[in-house]
Amino acid sequence: MIQVAAFKWVPPFAQGSVRDIRVRWALEEAGLPYAPMLIDFDQAASPEYRALQPFGQVPAYRDAEVELFESGAIVLHIARRSDALMPADEAGKDRVTCWLFAASNSIEPYVAQLAGIDLFHAKEAWAAERRPQVETQLRRKLADLQTALGDRNWFADDRFSAADIIMTHVLRDLRHTSIIADYPKLDAFVKRAEARPAFQKALADQLAPFRETEKAMAGA
């Protein structure tokens, strides 16, 4: 049985954004059953968990063949086992891999900078000066990304793939803003991806233990 490490609870602003959702989504699309391995922050810092995930983050992944960390690497591993997430031909696989890395390397750093300011540093004096610069840089990247998507539904060969899982998750980290609405093709892309039953199942499964933990905390 595949195991995926995930947190029992995170603060509300992070719910729906923790990266185990990428792996859950990929497994749902691939039709591969898995068991969540729920941990708290103390367990994440333990030597036992650090042996599986050196940085004490989630997700971590284990199947009959490998133990992995880093959500992009895990999603790529799953995609290689599933026609639902990656085409059979080598050139098609390379194009999916290219867009998966583009999401992680060309788009995510800019999204993360803005989200970091808004969610962690909004009240600090330097943030008011820095944020407009970060947003301008991000918007340039989003304009390029929208141009690259064009009239296609998906990024790699216009078929849903592992690349779209990572790209959607990256863009969803702007949902505390209205920025994506200014890029209609990207906005439609995210909504199209979020409407997929596999995403809805992955999101519900990530949120369920958070709700259970919150109920337990309220009753304590």
Image: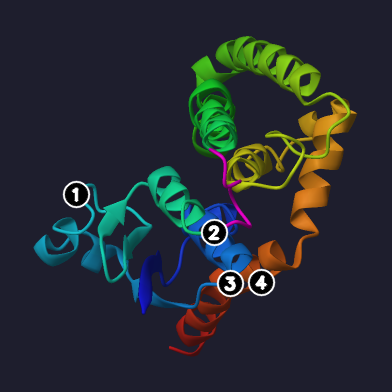
Q: Amino acid at mark 2?
A: Ser
Residue 79 x %, y %: 51, 52
State the residue position of label 3.
Answer: 31
Query: N-terminal of the two: label 1 or label 4?
Result: 1
Q: CA distance from mark 1 to mark 3?
A: 28 Å
Viewer-side residue, 91 vs 122: 91
Return the mark for residue 54. Answer: 1
Query: N-terminal of the two: label 4 or label 3?
Result: 3
Q: Which residues are magenta?
A: 82-89
Outermost residue to the front: 89
State the residue position of label 4.
Answer: 201
Q: Are marks 4 and 3 in contact (CB under 8 Å)?
A: no
Viewer-side residue, 149 vs 190: 149
Residue 3 x %, y %: 36, 72
Asked whether, in this view, residue 127 is left or right of residue 171, the answer is: left
Q: Amino acid at mark 4?
A: Lys
Viewer-side residue, 39 vs 159: 159
Circle 3: element type:
loop
Up/down of 5 relative to 95, above or below: below
State the residue position of label 2.
Answer: 82
Asked whether, in this view, residue 84 is left or right of residue 220, the answer is: right
Residue 25 x %, y %: 58, 61
Circle 1: element type:
loop
Q: Amino acid at mark 3?
A: Gly
Q: Are marks 3 and 2 in contact (CB under 8 Å)?
A: yes
Q: Amino acid at mark 1?
A: Pro
At a point 66% along the width and 13% down the height, the residue shown is: 132
